């Protein structure tokens, strides 16, 4: 029989064994390690959470600043049943350039410019469609008249047309949107208007814009605010313009026509977009206060700019937009040739207008643009234009007979996008290693969509 003071048996279960000093140290080491690791990850998580909170606060601050800046610019749509625009879908915005002279109220208010701006969130692109102000349409209560009469009548009869609480600008925008929508058979989801002073102030707030003037412009009868005229001139080539100069460039028309003016207006809009995009999101956000001051009293829109989904959609477009790919369309003799003139009014062929609208709505592509191209020899080498024309035709382009350019010493090939065919122009520029310019080359009367002026760089 074992004495109770005898040593414990050595075969007892492990859990009953006494730990040696070495075992205790190892166990403590194993137990102590996880808290150290946990404390490191806790610090990282706290830092990430703090960064997220600060970022959210910054976004909220920027959003609040933007919402406060645009709130005075947003007005209610006076139309009883404006077209629906579900979040995330493309929208059509009628941009109205308003000619108003506060010092001369007897002159009334009229729309000087009508451009439909299509904002495509999914495709991340913008397209512009200009409508000549002398276009004859049916205006409610008036009948057949110029399309720019719609804004002026809606402005003057806002309460009669849309209710006692309707302000004149709301009435003008509403009737213009109704009239343009009926003419184009296109839903106009929102409207925006800006007067000439506001247009110039926006460009000044940007520090000016860069415009590549395609040809020399001389207007001996440019109208002045005091109902006089003045001579204005623009030399060809890239140049920096302030607000006053860009406004003159966008409004002058006596050197060519109202159709040339529509092209210049789109060119200035694209230059403004390029200027904003070049500044990046932060730079554009920092411009908001000055842009808000520039637009105060000169701009109004039914576009819900402060709505989060609208803001995100427009930001999504802006971050992926290539300004050179902005679609530029217009109703003009080169896009709708079967028109009739009734006095100073223009009556367009409805089928041709629908074709322009289809192009405006389509995704830009070489196939959908169906551009006609002419190659001009600017290198002074016999047969060069014919050879390149044949190569382009073999590549699937629609090419008309080649000809000589006004100059024979052109150093580098240039692709002139005359009527707004950006996809075709970009593909030609890539094939020929050429630069792209908007409008026709100086000294050439265009009869096609794109003109290629070959330079010495094409001589092999």
Image (cartoon, rainbow, N blue to C red):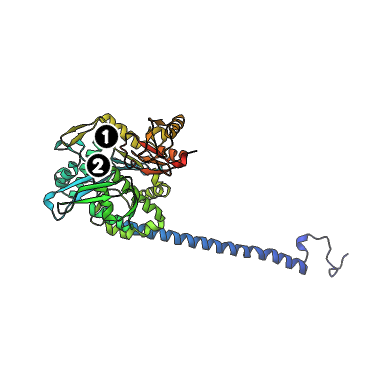
Could you tell me residue 199's position as x and y percent?
27, 53
Q: Image check: 101 left or right of 376?
A: left
Residue beneath disc 2: 256
Chain-order first, disc 1 or disc 2: 2
Numbered label attached to residue 48: none
Q: Which residue is the extreme one toward the left?
A: 106
Could you tell me residue 89's position as x and y percent?
37, 41
Q: CA distance from mark 1 to mark 2?
A: 13 Å
Give the residue drawn at x 43%, y 44%: 412
Judging from the image, what secondary structure is the residue with disc 2 in?
loop
Name the foreground residue: 444 vs 24. 444
Residue beneath disc 1: 333
- Image quarter of residue 340: top left
Name the foreground residue: 247 vs 114. 247
Judging from the image, what secondary structure is the residue with disc 1 in?
loop
Rendered view: 145 above or below 170:
above
Q: Is residue 74 visible?
A: no
Rendered view: 109 above or below 34:
above
Q: Image check: 339 left or right of 58?
A: left
Name the foreground residue: 320 vs 177. 320
């Amino acid at each position: 029989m074992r004495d109770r003071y005898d040593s414990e048996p050595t075969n007892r279960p492990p859990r009953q064994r006494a730990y040696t000093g070495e075992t205790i140290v190892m166990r403590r080491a194993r137990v102590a390690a996880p808290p150290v690791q946990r404390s490191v990850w806790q610090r990282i998580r706290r830092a990430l959470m703090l960064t997220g909170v600060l970022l959210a606060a910054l976004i909220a601050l920027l959003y609040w600043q933007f919402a406060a800046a645009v709130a005075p610019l947003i007005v209610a749509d006076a139309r009883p049943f404006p077209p629906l625009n579900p979040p995330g879908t493309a929208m059509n915005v009628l941009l109205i350039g308003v000619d108003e002279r506060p010092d001369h109220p007897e002159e009334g208010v009229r729309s000087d410019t009508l451009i439909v701006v299509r904002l495509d969130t999914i495709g991340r692109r913008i397209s512009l469609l200009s409508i000549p102000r002398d276009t004859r349409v049916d205006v409610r209560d008036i009948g057949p008249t110029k399309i720019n009469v719609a804004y002026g009548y809606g402005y003057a009869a806002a309460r009669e047309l849309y209710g006692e609480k309707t302000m004149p600008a709301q009435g003008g925008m509403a009737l213009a949107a109704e009239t343009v929508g009926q003419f184009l058979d296109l839903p106009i989801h929102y409207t925006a208007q800006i007067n000439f002073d506001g247009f110039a102030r926006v460009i000044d707030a940007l520090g000016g814009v860069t415009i590549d003037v395609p040809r020399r412009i001389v207007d001996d009868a440019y109208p002045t605010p005091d109902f006089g005229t003045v001579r204005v001139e623009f030399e060809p080539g890239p140049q920096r313009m302030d607000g006053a100069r860009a406004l003159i460039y966008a409004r002058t028309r006596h050197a060519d026509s109202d159709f040339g003016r529509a092209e210049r207006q789109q060119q200035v809009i694209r230059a403004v977009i390029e200027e904003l995009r070049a500044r990046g999101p932060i730079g554009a956000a920092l411009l908001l206060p000055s842009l808000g001051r520039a637009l105060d009293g000169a701009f109004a829109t039914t576009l819900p700019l402060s709505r989060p989904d609208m803001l995100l959609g427009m930001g999504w477009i802006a971050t992926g937009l290539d300004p050179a790919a902005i679609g530029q369309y217009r109703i003009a003799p080169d896009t709708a040739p079967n028109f009739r003139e009734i006095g100073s009014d223009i009556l367009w062929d409805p089928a041709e207008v629908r074709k322009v609208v289809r192009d405006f709505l389509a995704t830009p592509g070489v196939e959908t643009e169906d551009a006609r191209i002419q190659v001009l020899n600017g290198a002074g080498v016999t047969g060069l234009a014919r050879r390149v024309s044949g190569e382009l035709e073999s590549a699937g382009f629609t090419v008309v007979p080649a000809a000589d350019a006004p100059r024979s010493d052109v150093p580098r090939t240039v692709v002139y996008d005359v009527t707004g065919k950006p996809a075709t122009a970009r593909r030609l520029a890539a094939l020929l290693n050429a630069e792209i310019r908007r409008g026709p080359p100086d000294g050439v009367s265009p009869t096609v969509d794109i003109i290629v002026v070959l330079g010495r760089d094409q001589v092999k």
